Amino acid sequence: MKFPAILLSVAFSILSFMGIAQPVIYANQIGFDTKGSKIAVVSVDTKLTKKTVFNLVNAVTNKAEFTGVLSGPQNIDEWTPGKTYYQANFSSFKNTGKYSVQVIIAGKAYKSFPFKIDEDALAKLTLSSIIHYYNKQRANTPQELAADEHMRLQGGGDKTVDMRGGWCDASGDVSKYFSHLAYANFMSPQQTPLVTWSMVSASEAIPGLLKKWNIKDSLDNEALYGADYMMRALSKDDYFYMIVFSYFNKDPNARRIVGLRANSVTTDEYQCAFREGGGMAIAALARISRWKKNGGYTSQQYLDGAKRAFAHLLINNTKYDDDGKENIIDDYCALMAATELWIATDSPLYRDEARKRAQNLNKRMSAEGYFIANDANRPYWHASDAGLPVVALSRYLTKEKDEAQRTAALSTIKKALDYNLAVTSKVSNPFGYARQSFLYKGAVKDGFFIPHDNETGWWWQGEDARLSSLATAALVGGKLVYPDKGNWGVKDQLAVFASQQLSWTLGCNPYSMCFMYGFGKNNVPYMHSNFGHGSEKGGISNGITGKKDNGDGSGIDYKTEDNGNEWRWTEQWIPHAAWFLQAISAMAEK
């Protein structure tokens, strides 16, 4: 009976979105931090003619504990012509408990789905489930382990290597990726290595809370599990194997180590460049080596592996870049690799390489405030890692003490964050969805969602990882360039920006969908996968996109059925939860 109920709930949400004439309250369906921004959105079909108050109602006592006035009106004609939106801002409310936002319009009361307000609410409520999600994504069934222990290489004849471990990439794909979309050059996401680095980062950011909640050992063990897989993926020739591809075949013996192009076309170009997972793998191994903990390998082996791989890519990186040229993704991934090795070893070699990559990023900053991805005019935009340049520079600044180097990097971070705020607020935007600039048909265009016509030729999906990455950048970068005593240590505008990105993922969006499975009122339908894998509590689905048929990503879309293409919206993907983990850790970090 659960599945039909979910569909009915989804159908009701979509009907409400499409124009059923009743007010709707959109809110984060999980929780808000007492010390952070708290905003809900109210939509109506007819503009309100007078000042309208809202109440924050205690879900236990049913009493109003806070009253405010709706701000607005705002419209998003690109998404919902005729709809009018208002914001209910209750950021100043600090009491803990379970609450709903209530408004009375035309004599009738409307309430949001209840949520919690608590200290470090999102970390407290979701972190254990995120760890559970990754644990269940382990490629450790007997079938996978047996096949992966003797993994053949594309074009490699009878040669096999041990590729046991790692996490299945998505709820519909049991392949294992350091990165995919390498052939497109400008869109490579960071996958397994990012997950591992994010776990290490979170463990170091909030160790006291993790111990208090009795989950630090679980998180650390999951990070070590990721490091062990990357060590197995490090070839004897010192490059990382990029992909173990399933071909979406139920036979585990069909799996191969491959490079990947569009439409599941595989190649023998399986060596990772910095931008193809190599840089973040080096960073994760170097960082976790400092724990002096052993997984399947020793901490010294983790460090030695990172050194070997870095030395190899210093010589061979452009050989592995599909177009033979480095771009911004090489820069920020190599910066992260060099930084973590510099922190781990204090070697001038890594210091100099980190400075070189940081300077490259500084030079890529445009007058408008967005990064340039290539050596010409392509704005940097990214469907999952948009915040990583700022995060990499911020991590670098934990080690860099030279004032000239620091000043330059801080200026770049400030410009990037200013741009994110400016482009997001340039148009009416009641949900605060992070907008971006991109090159479309030869001209720079601003939009909410990534362009569907892009270098991959086919790939676009919901951007929940991108939102959490930008929230992370706003918090870790904001603490450096816009410090403040409240609001997670950053100025109010950045705190609002960060909160709204996560709230969108958790239900404050025009479809009222909570994309973290097992939480909130509305979740996407369960997705099955091979070897017993599939959707798991704590996993985050891709989310909302621009209109399906719009090449520039304009409009808005969310589908649970689309002739096999519904994965664009509904599939869980490991980078989403990794970036969400970083964002909530940055919120909770003292």
Image: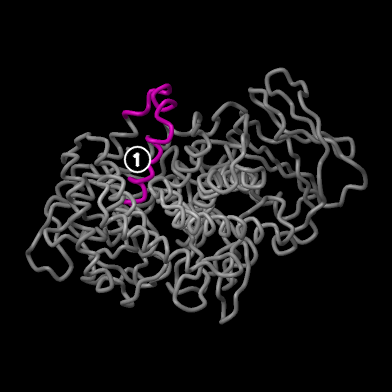
In the image, residue 388 lies at what x, y percent? 45, 55
For the view shown, which residue lies furthest in the bottom direction? 442
For the view shown, which residue lies furthest in the left direction? 158
Determine the residue positioned at 32% across, 49% down. 340
In the image, residue 257 lies at what x, y percent? 20, 62
For the view shown, which residue lies furthest in the right direction? 50
Tell me the magenta residue range.
Answer: 192-217
In the image, residue 133 lies at what x, y percent? 38, 39
Helix, strand or loop for the magenta stretch, by majority: helix
Residue 8 in sight from this viewpoint: no
Q: Which of the 4 quarters of the picture holds residue 484?
A: top right
The residue lying toward the viewer, choosing from 310 and 533, is 310
The residue lying toward the viewer, choosing from 20 and 449, is 449
Determine the residue positioned at 41% across, 38% down. 202
Q: Is residue 5 left or right of residue 253?
A: right
Q: How many marks?
A: 1
Q: Is residue 434 magenta?
A: no
Q: Which of the 4 quarters of the picture holds residue 333?
A: bottom left
The residue lying toward the viewer, choosing from 427 and 508, is 427
Determine the residue positioned at 22% across, 34% down. 293
Q: Residues within 10 Å of mark 1 (few under 14, many from 20)?
A: many
In the image, residue 82 lies at what x, y percent? 80, 59
**Vertical comparison of 55 with 315: above or below:** above
Determine the residue positioned at 23% across, 42% down. 140
**Vertical comparison of 18 with 28: above or below:** below
Q: Is residue 203 magenta?
A: yes
Q: Looking at the image, what colour scheme do you see?
A: one colour
Q: Is residue 422 left or right of residue 251?
A: right
- Indicate the secondary structure of the residue bearing disc 1: helix
**Amino acid at pointer 1:** Val
Residue 317 in sight from this viewpoint: yes
Residue at the spot of label 1: 200
